[in-house]
C-alpha cells in the first residue's frame, strides 16, 4: 500500500486545487483507479493474481491551456503500479504544443500521442471505456506507455468529401520512441539476463487515415507505425531493425449500441546479445477483436468482446504462441466523478500477459479471471 500512496496523493491534491483556485481558462483533468485481479490458474501481468491481487493502481493529472485561438499547449503526468511494473517514478505521457491553422491542417510538436488503431491514443484515459482491459493483442497494458506517444511532430486535419461521401481525418507523424524502463518488454528482457539502465529506443514514423462515412455512426480506418529499437545494457544489447505495425478497424454507434472490430499485424525480428550469446527473437504477431456494448440504463452499461492473438512465426498449436480471450464486462457510474467496473475473462493460451518470474512452476494452458476496478475522474 505504501508504494501507491504518492500516486493517490498526487491526484487528490490536484483535484482539490481545481476547486480552490481561479484557473483563468486553464483546464486541469485527472483520474485515479484501483484495480483487483483474481485468476483461477497462472499469475497474470506480474501480479500474484492466483491469490487475488490489488497491486494495480493508476493515476494521472493533465494541464492544458489555449494561449491563442489557434495555439494550445498541455502536459500529462502519470504514475502507475501494475504488479512488478511501474513504480514511484512520474512519467510524462504527453507534453505538446498544438497549432491549428484551419479545419484542414494543424501541427503538433513535443511528446505527442501516437495514432494506431481505434484506441491507442486514448487508452491513457480509463474513464472513457467500459472495459477494464482492452483487447491485449492490440493494446497490451503492460507496455502501454511505449505505444501511447513519441517525441517528435505530427500533422493532422480534416477533409470534407461532400455531403454524400462523408469526411476524412488524417494524421502523419515522425519522431523517436523509448521503451519504458519499468514496462513489460524490459521486464521480459531481464528474464534473459539483460537488465537495462537506460531505455532502448529508436526512430518511429507513420500515420492514420479515418473515414467518417455517410452512414451516421460508422467509422472505418487504417493505421501504420514503423518502429526500430536499439539499446545497450551492462551485459549486452538489443537490436530490432525497423518493423511495421499495421491496423485496420471499424466502429459503429447507434443509440445505446456500440460495435467495433480491429485487426493488427506486427511482424518483427530482434536479437538480444547477452554476454557472448546472441538470442534471436522472431515474431509474426497477428491479432483481431470484435466487441459490442449496450447501455441498459443511464448509469449502467454492459458489453462483451472476443480477442484473438497468434504468433505465426512459431508453432501455433502450442499455448505459448496464442491467446484467445472471451470477455464479459459491466460498468456503473455512481455520479459524474466515481465509477466501478467488473469483468470476467475466459483465457485460452498463454501467449500474452504472463511472466516467468511470477509463474516459476510453469503455466497451465487455460485460465478464468475476474477483474474489478473503481475509478475517480475529474
Image (cartoon, rainbow, N blue to C red):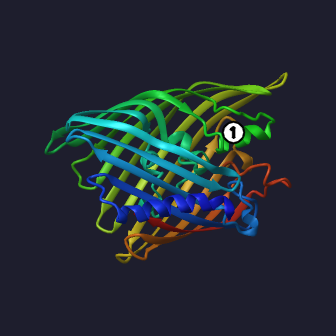
Q: Quadrant of residue 37?
A: bottom right
Residue position for label 1? 186
Q: In this view, does 258 lie to the left or right of 147?
A: left
Task: Give 375 or 26, whichever is nearer the viewer.
Answer: 26
Percent coordinates x, y for residue 108 in the rendering: 34, 34
Q: Does residue 327 appear anywhere in the picture?
A: yes
Percent coordinates x, y for residue 358 in the rendering: 78, 54
Percent coordinates x, y for residue 366 in the rendering: 72, 60
Task: Give 159 or 317, whichever is nearer the viewer.
Answer: 159
Q: How many marks?
A: 1
Residue at 30% x, 46% y: name it: 65
Q: Quadrant of residue 270?
A: top right
Q: Is residue 313 left or right of residue 291?
A: right
Report helix, strand or loop for mark 1. helix
Indicate whether 375 appears above or below 284.
below
Task: Give 7 or 259, whichever is nearer the viewer.
Answer: 7
Q: Which of the image's four quarters has the N terminus?
A: bottom right
Q: Does residue 132 appear anywhere in the picture?
A: no
Residue at 67% x, 34% y: name it: 313
Amino acid at each position: 500500500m505504501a508504494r501507491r500512496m504518492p500516486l493517490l496523493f498526487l491526484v487528490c491534491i490536484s483535484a482539490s486545487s481545481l476547486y480552490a483556485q481561479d484557473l483563468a481558462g486553464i483546464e486541469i483533468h485527472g483520474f485515479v483507479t484501483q484495480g483487483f485481479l483474481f485468476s483461477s490458474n497462472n499469475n497474470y501481468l506480474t501480479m500474484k493474481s492466483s491469490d487475488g491481487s490489488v497491486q494495480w493502481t493508476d493515476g494521472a493529472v493533465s494541464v492544458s491551456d489555449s494561449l491563442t485561438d489557434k495555439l494550445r499547449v498541455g502536459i500529462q503526468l502519470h504514475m502507475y503500479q501494475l504488479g512488478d511494473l511501474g513504480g514511484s517514478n512520474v512519467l510524462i505521457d504527453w507534453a505538446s504544443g498544438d497549432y491549428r491553422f484551419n479545419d484542414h491542417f494543424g501541427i503538433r510538436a513535443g511528446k505527442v500521442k501516437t495514432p494506431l488503431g481505434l484506441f491507442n491514443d486514448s487508452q491513457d484515459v480509463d474513464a472513457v471505456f467500459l472495459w477494464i482491459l482492452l483487447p491485449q493483442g492490440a493494446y497490451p497494458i503492460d507496455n502501454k506507455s511505449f505505444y501511447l506517444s513519441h517525441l517528435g511532430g505530427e500533422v493532422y486535419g480534416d477533409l470534407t468529401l461532400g455531403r454524400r461521401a462523408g469526411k476524412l481525418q488524417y494524421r502523419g507523424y515522425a519522431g523517436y520512441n523509448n521503451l519504458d524502463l519499468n514496462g513489460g518488454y524490459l521486464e521480459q528482457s531481464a528474464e534473459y539476463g539483460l537488465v537495462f539502465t537506460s531505455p532502448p529506443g529508436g526512430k518511429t514514423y507513420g500515420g492514420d487515415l479515418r473515414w467518417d462515412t455517410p452512414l451516421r455512426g460508422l467509422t472505418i480506418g487504417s493505421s501504420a507505425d514503423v518502429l526500430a529499437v536499439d539499446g545497450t545494457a551492462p551485459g549486452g544489447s538489443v537490436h530490432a531493425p525497423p518493423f511495421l505495425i499495421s491496423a485496420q478497424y471499424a466502429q459503429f454507434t447507434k443509440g445505446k449500441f456500440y460495435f467495433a472490430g480491429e485487426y493488427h499485424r506486427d511482424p518483427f525480428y530482434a536479437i538480444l546479445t547477452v554476454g557472448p550469446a546472441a538470442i534471436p527473437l522472431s515474431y509474426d504477431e497477428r491479432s483481431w477483436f470484435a466487441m459490442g456494448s449496450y447501455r441498459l440504463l443511464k448509469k449502467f452499461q454492459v458489453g462483451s468482446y472476443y480477442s484473438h492473438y497468434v504468433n505465426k512465426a512459431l508453432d501455433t498449436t502450442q499455448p505459448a504462441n496464442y491467446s484467445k480471450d472471451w470477455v464479459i464486462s459491466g460498468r456503473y457510474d455512481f455520479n459524474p466523478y466515481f465509477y466501478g467496473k467488473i469483468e470476467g475473462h475466459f483465457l485460452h493460451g498463454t501467449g500474452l500477459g504472463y511472466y516467468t518470474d511470477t509463474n516459476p512452476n510453469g503455466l497451465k494452458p487455460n485460465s478464468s479471471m475476474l477483474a474489478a476496478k473503481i475509478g475517480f475522474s475529474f
